[in-house]
Image: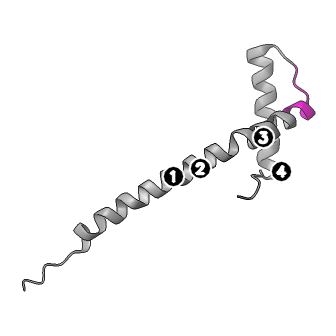
């Protein structure tokens, strides 16, 4: 799997959310540098597990659709 990355806009927005969260919930001033470090850590540690779960969820969804396919399109030939 290739490394998970975020667009600059998404990364900036996430850093802002982290800074507000730390300020409001923990009374902690989180610098931009530290917010970026938290984002990097989360991408490295949680990213693969979240990605794999998303792939499994999509696979299960499509498998359900494939399982229903025969019932949806089956035509009884009467023979």
Q: Earlier in the sequence, mark 3 or mark 1?
A: 3
Q: Which of marks 2 and 3 is nearer the N terminus?
A: 3
Neighbor class of circle 3 (other Cα within 10 Å; few <14, some 14-19, many 20+) is few
| Residue named by callout 4 | 8
Residue in the image at 76% along x and 38% along y: 14
- Residue 52 numbered mark, or none: 2
Q: Earlier in the sequence, mark 4 or mark 2?
A: 4
Residue in the image at 80% along x and 49% along y: 9
Q: What element carries label 3?
A: helix
61 horizontally vs 70: left or right: right
Residue furthest top in the image: 27
18 horizontally vs 57: left or right: right
Q: How many labels does the image show?
A: 4
| Cβ atoms at labels 2 and 3 below 8 Å apart | no
Residue 58: % across, % down = 49, 55
Q: Split into 4 quadrants, where in the image is the N terminus? A: bottom right
Residue 5: % across, % down = 77, 52
Q: Which of marks 1 and 4 is nearer the N terminus?
A: 4
| Residue named by callout 1 | 56
| Residue named by callout 3 | 13
Q: What stretch is highlighted in magenta?
A: 29-35
Q: What element carries label 4?
A: helix
| Cβ atoms at labels 4 and 2 below 8 Å apart | no
52 horizontally vs 10: left or right: left
Scheme by which the image is coloured: one colour
- Residue 71 numbered mark, or none: none
Quadrant of the rendered image containing residue 70: bottom left
Quadrant of the rendered image containing residue 17: top right
| Cβ atoms at labels 1 and 2 below 8 Å apart | yes
Residue furthest bottom in the image: 79
| Cβ atoms at labels 1 and 4 below 8 Å apart | no
What's the CA distance linking mark 1 and mark 4?
A: 27 Å
């Amino acid at each position: 799997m290739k490394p998970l990355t975020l667009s600059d806009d998404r990364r900036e927005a996430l850093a802002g959310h982290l800074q507000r969260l730390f300020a409001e919930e923990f009374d902690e001033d989180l610098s931009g540098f530290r917010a970026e470090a938290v984002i990097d850590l989360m991408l490295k540690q949680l990213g693969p597990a979240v990605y794999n779960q998303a792939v499994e969820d999509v696979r299960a969804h499509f498998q359900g659709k494939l399982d229903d396919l025969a019932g949806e399109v089956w035509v009884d030939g009467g023979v």
